């Protein structure tokens, strides 16, 4: 049986300010109504003998993953939680150990959660072509047939054609299987052009198909520190609320390495299948411009946007009117707390600026003003040194933790729906236009007993207003101290 392993631990920094650490690009609906993560799961429909998916994600994203699975109606997924990022080799190793505990013959289909694939049928054909090789012990990767001299991707150089897996013709078929001659780092433009002209190089997609036991055998041989750390991380994992929490100390001991570096560049059993499936890693704003619905001027305009004499540009407005005049080949991305303006040829440098923001400790790197929680969401409307105003939405039937604060008091005003409030020894209901005051240090809880979302305005006041000033005494989502 094929077990899809969806790797969802990335932060998508090159798509800042839309992508943030707390809500990265894989969970954004960049094309249509579904996120890239949901689209990755959707394209598995129709894959022969495909079992329930296994998700590997960061602990802080676990409720995002669970909610997006719920929307898809996926109820049988396994969710492995990484206590910290350690790249793709440890993530896949933990998935392989977990899969083998249930199926000794498990085939792992390893997929990034944040890629775009337009031609799903072509992907399925490539998977079918690689399955026999994987079952016989090969480590299969899928190389994207390049369409331009791209400097932002790594490359795979193919070796000899394995005739036992495909027919010999003058034109190499999509389902051909080749040995891997080399993995190549991101080239400069001149080198990338030579790769394109040679027809021997493919973009490295980061997608793999192999037996779980063969992957672990090669990992133990070639990267024993990763193998041993992940073995312990899975063996000592704890399960709670349908999540598998990998052991933090063991997982932290693993080197932070990719599958390519740990295994694929060193093994003699790696093979590559050329794939033409409308693939894009959606890694930069220029990639979104390429894949977007361009108007007659070559512009992709999203949100409340007005232009004059603008061509070949991507403009995204999230919270206000954006007006652009006399521009060409630019990216403008507006959110409620940040605006990005860049030339389309320099969008790779966004990551550099995000790193600078991280060094400065800026909140704009971590989260949007609109922050999602397992019970709903909140948005900061205004703040100053000793007060903060939030708009809070609580989903029907959801409730916040039973908690108290050491440094702040809160005033709640219900503007829509009905709230059930616990305050000290009291429990009571509030309707629209009603309010209550929660003094500093008083135990409290907010619930939505109704069938429509509960909306309220919260005014916080005190000497410290950080999100870490919460002492959770009881929590429906397993977050209590």
Image: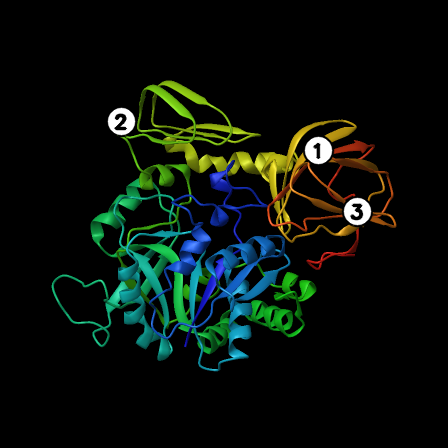
Q: Secondary structure at mark 2?
A: loop
Residue 422 position, x and y percent, is 80, 48
Label 3 vs label 1: CA separation?
15 Å
Crowding at dot 1, Cα within 10 Å, few <14 / some 14-19 / many 20+, comes out as few
Q: Which residue is mark 2?
A: 297
Residue 321 visible somewhere in the drawing:
yes
Quadrant of image for the C terminus: bottom right
Q: Are marks 2 and 3 in contact (CB under 8 Å)?
A: no
- 108 vs 362: above or below: below
| Residue farthest toward the bottom in the current orientation of the protein | 104
Q: Are marks 3 and 1 in contact (CB under 8 Å)?
A: no
Q: Which residue is mark 3?
A: 428
Residue found 41% across the figure and 77% down from its top: 1
Label 2 vs label 3: CA separation?
58 Å
Residue found 33% across the figure and 62% down from its top: 142
Judged by depth in the image, the label closer to the viewer, 2 or 3, is 3
In the rendered structure, the answer to whether residue 117 lies left or right of residue 444 reads left
For residue 435, what is the image quadrant?
A: top right
Crowding at dot 3, Cα within 10 Å, few <14 / some 14-19 / many 20+, comes out as few
Judged by depth in the image, the label closer to the viewer, 2 or 1, is 1
- 274 vs 321: above or below: below
Residue 169 position, x and y percent, is 12, 67
Sooner in the amino-acid sequence: mark 2 or mark 3: 2
Residue 41 position, x and y percent, is 42, 60
Q: Secondary structure at mark 1?
A: loop
Label 2 vs label 1: CA separation?
49 Å
Q: Which residue is mark 1?
A: 433
């Amino acid at each position: 049986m094929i077990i899809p392993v969806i790797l969802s631990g990335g932060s998508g920094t090159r798509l800042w300010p839309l992508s943030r650490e707390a809500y990265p690009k894989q969970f954004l609906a960049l094309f249509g109504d579904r996120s890239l993560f949901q689209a990755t799961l959707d394209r598995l429909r129709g894959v022969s003998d495909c079992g329930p998916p296994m998700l590997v994600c960061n602990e802080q994203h676990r409720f995002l993953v669970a909610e997006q699975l719920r929307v898809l109606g996926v109820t049988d997924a396994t969710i492995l939680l990484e206590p910290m990022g350690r790249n793709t080799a440890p993530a896949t190793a933990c998935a392989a150990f977990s899969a083998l505990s249930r199926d000794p013959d498990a085939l792992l289909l390893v997929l990034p959660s944040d890629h775009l694939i337009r031609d799903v049928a072509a992907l399925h054909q490539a998977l079918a072509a690689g399955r026999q090789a994987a079952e016989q012990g090969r480590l299969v990767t899928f190389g994207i047939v390049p369409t331009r001299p791209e400097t932002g991707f790594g490359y795979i150089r193919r070796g000899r054609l394995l005739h036992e897996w495909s027919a010999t013709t003058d034109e190499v078929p999509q389902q051909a299987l080749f040995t891997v001659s080399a993995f190549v780092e991101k080239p400069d433009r001149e080198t990338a052009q030579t790769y394109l002209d040679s027809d021997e190089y493919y973009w490295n997609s980061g997608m793999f198909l192999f037996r779980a036991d063969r992957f672990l055998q090669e990992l133990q041989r070639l990267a024993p520190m990763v193998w041993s750390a992940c073995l312990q991380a899975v063996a000592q994992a704890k399960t709670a609320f349908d999540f598998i929490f990998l052991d933090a100390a063991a997982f932290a001991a693993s080197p932070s390495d990719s599958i390519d570096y740990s295994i694929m560049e060193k093994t003699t059993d790696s093979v590559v299948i050329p794939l033409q499936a409308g693939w894009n890693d959606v890694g930069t704003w220029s990639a979104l411009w390429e894949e977007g619905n361009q108007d007659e001027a070559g512009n992709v305009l999203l949100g409340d946007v007005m232009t004059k004499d603008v061509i070949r540009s991507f403009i995204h407005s999230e919270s206000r009117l954006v007006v652009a005049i006399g521009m060409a080949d630019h990216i403008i991305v507006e959110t409620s707390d940040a605006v990005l303006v860049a030339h389309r040829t320099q969008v790779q440098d966004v990551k550099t600026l995000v790193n600078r923001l991280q060094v400065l400790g800026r909140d704009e790197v971590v989260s949007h003003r609109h922050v999602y929680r397992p019970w709903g969401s909140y948005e900061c409307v205004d703040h100053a040194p000793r007060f903060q105003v939030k708009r809070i939405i609580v989903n029907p039937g959801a409730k916040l933790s039973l908690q108290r604060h050491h440094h702040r008091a809160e005033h709640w005003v219900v503007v829509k729906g009905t709230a059930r409030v616990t305050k000290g020894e009291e429990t009571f209901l509030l309707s629209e236009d009603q309010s209550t005051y929660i003094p500093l240090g008083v135990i409290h809880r907010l619930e939505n007993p109704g069938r429509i979302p509960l909306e309220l305005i919260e005014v916080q006041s005190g000497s410290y207003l950080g999100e870490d000033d919460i002492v959770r005494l009881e929590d429906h989502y397993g977050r209590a101290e």
